[in-house]
Image (spheres, rainbow, N blue to C red):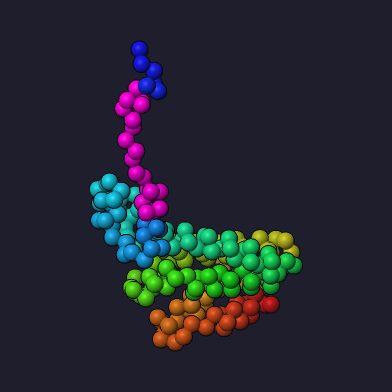
Amino acid sequence: MATALQRTLENPPVSRAGPLDALDLARRRFLHGDRLDMGDLARDLGVSRATLYRWVGDRELLLGEVLWSLAESGLEQARRHADAAAPGGGAAWVHSFVTKNIELTAGSVPIRRFVEADPELALRVLTSKHGVQQRRLIEALRQVLEERARRGELDLKLPAADLAYAIVRISESFIWRDFITGEEPDLERAGDVVRVLLGA
């Protein structure tokens, strides 16, 4: 009688794609500068469009997840930067954390390329309250503010959720104002406003 291993070697299982494979492929294409086409993604994953939509929602939701995967990496980098730039913590640490994240977002070639190619879609995905990106960014910042306040490093004059919302929305308006108002982005001014909000 054949062993389970022998049977498996004779009839290897078909590797099936899943939702994480869809995100990984979409992310690679986004970073490469390719337009995210759901039909192409489904075909290359070996699934139907209906399956892909069931996995990821629609194209905007998938783009939001791709952008959030980049944002998570940026937040970790911003945290390391703040640890080095403001080891004493407090408002200076939060300011360093926020301004580094603003700098990373504004300087991201794939993100800027996306915004330049389709400003309406990109800003909707990046800054809409209905998308995943803004909501998660506000939540991540709320957690940072509460973490620093619990340590006694920060005296919050507003609820952390309200302050996080204000900082994220103001940051967005300065990062993307060339697409919103036609004016040049002003990251330094964004940092100044964040400093005032933090009472630094």
The answer to whether one can see residue 147 in this image is yes
Q: In the rendered view, does 19 fall on the left or right side of 167?
A: left
Q: Is residue 148 magenta?
A: no
Q: From the viewer's perspective, is residue 122 above or below residue 7?
A: below
Q: Is residue 8 magenta?
A: yes
Q: From the viewer's perspective, is residue 127 above or below residue 188?
A: above
Q: Residue 56 location, x and y as percent?
A: 35, 53
The answer to whether one can see residue 153 in this image is no
Q: Residue 88 location, x and y as percent?
A: 75, 67
- Farthest residue, direction bottom: 183
Q: Residue 82 location, x and y as percent?
A: 65, 67
Residue nearer the viewer, 17 or 51: 17
Task: Residue 113: name its quadrant.
Answer: bottom left
- Farthest residue, direction top: 1
Q: Residue 58 location, x and y as percent?
A: 31, 58
Point 50% across, 80% down: residue: 174
Residue nearer the viewer, 153 or 85: 85
Point 43% across, 83% down: residue: 178
Residue range highlighted in magenta: 7-25
Q: From the viewer's perspective, is residue 6 above or below residue 147?
A: above
Q: In the rendered view, does 30 fall on the left or right side of 81?
A: left
